[in-house]
Image: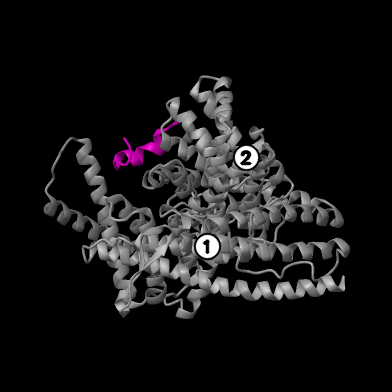
C-alpha cells in the first residue's frame, strides 16, 4: 500500500508536469489557428491573393491542440460518461467496476498506440502533406517538406499521454479498492473543464 | 456477430464507460472476436481522419468566441438588456432568462455554455427576487437548449460534417425553430405567472450607468444601420413578392434613413436615460450574430471563417470597447476552449470510426429495413423516430448521437421524401432538447452545479417546460415550412 501510494505520487507529479506543458502548447496552437485563418481571410479579400497552405496549416495545429490537451481533460474527468451505475453502487463495488472500465480503456489505448506507431513510422506517413513546407529557403537553406507523419503523430502522442494518465487512474482506483477513504484516491479537480454541446 | 456493435456499445455506456472509449472498444472487441483484426487499423485511422477536417474547426472557434464574450462581460450586458425589455412583466426574470438565452444563442453554439454563463448571474438574481432556486435552475436549463438551435450551433456543424449538408443551410433553418422554442417557453412562464403569482422585477438593475463617448457614437450609428438593414430586408421581400424586379436604390435608402431617424427620435422621448444606456450598451455585442450570419449569407465567409471572425470581434470589443480584458487573461481563456473542444473533437473522431466499422457490418441496412417495415406512412415514421431520438437524447449527448444515428436514419427519411435539411433540424432540435431531459441531461448537471440545487429537483421543475419543447418538436416535424422557409428565401436550398 505504501509502495502503491508512493508510485501514485510519483506518476501523478510526472503526469501533472508533462500535461502542464501540453496545455501551454495547446493554447498556443489554438492561437496560431486563429491567426492563420484570419490571415487567410485578409489575404483573400484585402490582398486578393488566396493562400494555398492556410487551411492545412490550421488543421495541423488543430490536431496537435487536441492531442496535447485531451489527456488533461481525461485526467480531470472531462470525458463524458454516464456515471449513474458507479454512483449507485457501494464504494468497493464501484471501485471494482471502475477498475474493469479502466482496463478496457487501457486495452483500447495500447492497441491504438501499436496501430498509431506503425502508421506514423510506416509507409503512409512518408508521403508529403499537400501544401506544407518549412520555408528554410528564407534563411538560406532548402525548403523542408512537412510529411503526413508529423501530423499523424499528434494522435499517437495523445494516446501515449492518455495511457500514462490511465495508468495513474488505475493505481488510484486500486488504492480506493483497498481503502475507500484514502485522500490520495481522486485526481485534484480543475475548474477549467467546460462542456461543448 | 457484427450486428452486436450497437448493443455492446450501449452496455459499455450504461455501466459508466466514457463515450470515447465505448465507441472504440465495442467495435474493436467484436472485430477481434470475429477474426477481423486487420480492420482495427481502419478503426484507428478513422479516428484521425474523422478529426482532420476544416469545417470542424468551427467548433473550437465558436467555443472560443463564446468563452471570450462571457469573460469580457458581454453576457451581463445582454442580461441587462433583456431585463430592460421584459423585466417589468409578471414572471419578469423568468422571461429575462429566456430572452437572454435567445440573444446568447446568437453568439454561442453551446447549451452548456449558455447554462453556466446565464445561470451564474440569473439564478441568484431570481432567488433574490422571490423565485425558488429549483424553478430558476429549471428555466435556465430549459431555455439553454435554444443555444444550439439558433445559429451558430456546434451540433449543426457536426451534423453537416457527418452528413455532407451545408452548414449555412442548417444554420438558417434553425433560426425560426429556436425562436419558437423561446416563445413557447415564455408562454409557459406567462401561464405559470398567473397560477403561482410570479413576481415582477425592476427594468433597471444598476442605475446611473454610462457609455463612453466613443461607444455611444458607434452604438448610435450601428443601431441606425441595423434598423435600415431591417427596413431594406422588408423592402426587398415585398418587392419580390409583388414581382418588381428592380427598385431605385438611392431614393429608397434616403426615405429609409429619414424613417429611421424619425423613429429613433420618437423612441428617445419614450425611454428613460437609464433604459437608453442599457440599450446602447447592447448594440455592439449584438452585432456578432449579424456578422456571423451576414457573412455566411452574403457568401463572404465559410462558417469556419465566420467563427474566427467572431473570435476576432470578441477580442476587439473586449479590449477596446468594454475594456474588460487584459492580454494576460487570454491564455487561460484559450486553454479552457482548447480543453473543451479537444474532448468534442476526439468524440467526433471516435464516432466517425465507429460509424465506418458499423457500416461494414450491414447493421444500418437491417435497421433501415426494420424501420421501414413498421409503417410506410412518413408521418407515422417521423412520429416513431422522434420518440426514438427523445429516448436516445435522455442518455446520450447530442454530438455522438448525431454521428452514430444520422447516417443510419438520414437516408431512410430522405428516400421517403423528407427534405434533408428538414430532417437535420428535427434530429438536431430533438437531441438538443435531450440535453435537458432527465435522467442524463448534460445541462441539468451543469445547472445543478451552477445553482447548488439537486439534479432530481431540477428535473421535476423542468417538466412543464419540456412539455412545451416536445410540442415544438412536433410542430417542426409536421410543418416543414418552419425550418425550410428561411433557407429557401435566401436561396440556400431548393
Q: Quadrant of the N terminus of chain A?
A: bottom right
Mark 2 surroundings within 10 Å by alpha-carbon count, few (fewer than 14), some (14 through 19), many (20 or more): few
Residue A154: mark: 1
Q: Is residue B411 left or right of residue B142?
A: left
Give the CA distance from mark 1 to mark 2. 26 Å
Residue A140: mark: none
Seen at 33% across and 59% down, the residue is: B291
The colour scheme is one colour
Seen at 47% across and 32% down, the residue is: B411
Q: Is residue B4 visible?
A: yes
Q: Position of residue B9 (x, y in %)?
A: 66, 42
Q: Is residue B118 left or right of residue A1?
A: left
**Quarter of the image holding residue B170?**
top left
User: In the rendered image of this protein, does residue B27 appear above or below residue A189?
Assistant: above
Seen at 45% across and 76% down, the residue is: B324
Instruction: Return the chain for callout 2.
Output: B
From which residue to which does the magenta span run? B478-494
The image shows a total of numbered marks equal to 2
Q: Position of residue B345 (x, y in %)?
A: 53, 55
SS state under label 1: helix
Foreground tag (1 vs 2): 2
Residue B485 in the magenta stretch? The answer is: yes
Q: Is residue B97 visible?
A: no
Q: Position of residue B20 (x, y in %)?
A: 62, 52
SS state under label 2: loop
Q: Which residue is mark 2?
A: B36
Q: Quick one: A160 or B6, which is closer to the camera?
A: A160
User: In the rendered image of this protein, does residue B52 appear above or below residue B3?
Assistant: below
Q: Quick one: B118 or B392, which is closer to the camera?
A: B392
Residue B142 in the magenta stretch? The answer is: no
Seen at 77% across and 71% down, the residue is: A8
Amino acid at each position: 500500500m505504501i509502495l502503491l501510494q508512493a508510485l501514485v505520487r510519483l506518476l501523478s507529479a510526472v503526469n501533472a508536469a508533462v500535461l502542464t506543458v501540453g496545455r501551454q502548447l495547446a493554447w498556443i496552437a489554438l492561437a496560431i489557428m486563429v491567426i492563420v485563418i484570419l490571415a487567410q481571410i485578409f489575404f483573400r479579400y484585402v490582398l486578393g491573393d488566396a493562400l494555398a497552405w492556410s487551411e492545412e496549416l490550421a488543421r495541423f495545429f488543430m490536431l496537435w491542440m487536441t492531442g496535447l490537451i485531451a489527456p488533461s481533460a481525461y485526467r480531470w474527468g472531462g470525458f463524458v460518461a454516464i456515471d449513474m451505475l458507479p454512483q449507485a453502487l457501494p464504494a468497493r463495488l464501484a471501485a471494482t467496476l471502475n477498475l474493469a472500465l479502466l482496463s478496457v480503456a487501457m486495452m483500447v489505448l495500447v492497441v491504438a498506440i501499436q496501430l498509431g506507431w506503425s502508421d506514423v513510422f510506416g509507409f503512409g506517413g512518408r508521403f508529403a502533406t499537400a501544401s506544407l513546407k518549412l520555408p528554410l529557403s528564407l534563411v538560406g537553406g532548402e525548403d523542408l517538406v512537412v510529411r503526413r507523419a508529423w501530423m499523424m503523430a499528434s494522435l499517437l502522442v495523445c494516446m501515449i499521454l492518455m495511457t500514462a494518465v490511465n495508468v495513474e487512474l488505475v493505481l488510484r482506483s486500486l488504492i480506493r479498492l483497498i481503502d475507500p477513504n484514502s485522500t490520495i484516491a481522486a485526481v485534484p479537480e480543475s475548474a477549467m473543464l467546460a462542456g461543448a454541446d | 456477430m457484427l450486428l452486436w456493435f450497437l448493443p455492446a456499445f450501449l452496455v459499455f455506456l450504461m455501466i459508466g464507460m466514457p463515450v470515447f472509449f465505448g465507441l472504440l472498444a465495442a467495435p474493436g472487441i467484436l472485430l477481434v472476436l470475429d477474426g477481423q483484426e486487420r480492420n482495427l487499423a481502419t478503426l484507428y485511422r478513422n479516428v484521425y481522419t474523422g478529426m482532420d477536417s476544416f469545417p470542424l474547426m468551427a467548433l473550437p472557434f465558436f467555443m472560443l468566441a463564446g468563452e471570450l464574450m462571457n469573460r469580457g462581460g458581454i453576457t451581463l450586458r445582454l442580461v441587462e438588456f433583456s431585463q430592460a425589455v421584459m423585466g417589468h412583466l409578471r414572471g419578469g426574470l423568468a422571461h429575462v432568462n429566456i430572452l437572454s438565452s435567445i440573444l446568447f444563442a446568437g453568439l454561442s453554439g453551446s447549451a452548456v455554455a449558455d447554462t453556466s454563463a446565464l445561470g451564474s448571474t440569473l439564478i441568484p438574481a431570481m432567488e433574490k427576487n422571490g423565485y425558488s432556486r429549483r424553478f430558476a435552475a429549471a428555466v435556465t436549463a430549459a431555455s439553454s437548449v435554444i443555444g444550439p438551435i439558433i445559429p451558430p450551433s456546434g451540433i449543426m456543424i457536426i451534423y453537416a460534417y457527418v452528413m455532407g449538408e451545408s452548414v449555412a443551410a442548417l444554420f438558417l433553418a434553425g433560426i425560426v425553430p429556436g425562436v419558437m422554442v423561446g416563445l413557447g417557453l415564455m408562454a409557459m412562464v406567462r401561464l405559470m405567472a398567473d397560477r403561482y403569482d410570479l413576481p415582477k422585477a425592476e427594468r433597471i438593475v444598476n442605475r446611473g450607468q454610462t457609455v463612453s463617448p466613443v461607444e455611444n457614437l458607434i452604438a448610435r450609428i450601428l443601431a441606425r444601420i441595423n434598423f435600415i438593414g431591417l427596413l431594406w430586408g422588408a423592402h426587398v421581400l415585398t418587392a419580390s413578392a409583388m414581382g418588381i424586379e428592380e427598385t431605385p436604390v438611392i431614393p429608397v435608402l434616403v426615405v429609409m434613413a429619414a424613417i429611421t431617424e424619425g423613429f429613433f427620435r420618437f423612441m428617445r422621448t419614450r425611454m428613460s436615460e437609464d433604459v437608453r444606456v442599457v440599450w446602447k450598451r447592447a448594440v455592439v455585442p449584438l452585432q456578432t450574430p449579424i456578422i456571423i450570419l451576414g457573412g455566411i449569407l452574403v457568401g463572404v465567409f465559410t462558417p469556419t471563417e465566420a467563427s474566427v471572425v467572431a473570435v476576432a470581434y470578441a477580442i476587439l470589443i473586449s479590449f477596446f470597447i468594454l475594456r474588460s480584458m487584459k492580454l494576460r487573461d487570454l491564455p487561460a481563456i484559450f486553454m479552457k476552449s482548447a480543453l473543451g473542444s479537444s474532448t468534442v473533437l476526439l468524440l467526433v473522431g471516435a464516432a466517425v470510426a465507429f460509424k465506418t466499422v458499423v457500416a461494414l457490418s450491414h447493421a444500418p441496412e437491417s435497421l433501415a429495413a426494420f424501420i421501414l417495415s413498421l409503417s410506410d406512412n412518413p408521418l407515422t415514421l417521423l412520429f416513431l423516430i422522434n420518440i426514438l431520438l427523445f429516448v436516445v437524447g435522455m442518455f446520450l449527448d447530442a454530438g455522438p448521437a448525431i454521428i452514430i444515428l444520422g447516417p443510419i436514419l438520414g437516408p431512410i427519411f430522405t428516400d421517403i421524401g423528407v427534405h434533408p435539411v428538414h430532417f437535420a433540424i428535427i434530429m438536431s432540435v430533438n437531441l438538443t432538447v435531450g440535453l435537458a431531459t432527465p435522467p442524463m441531461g448534460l445541462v441539468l448537471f451543469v445547472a445543478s452545479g451552477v445553482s447548488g440545487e439537486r439534479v432530481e429537483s431540477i428535473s421535476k421543475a423542468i417538466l412543464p417546460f419540456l412539455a412545451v419543447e416536445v410540442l415544438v418538436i412536433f410542430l417542426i416535424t409536421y410543418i416543414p415550412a418552419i425550418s425550410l422557409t428561411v433557407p429557401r428565401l435566401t436561396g440556400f436550398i431548393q
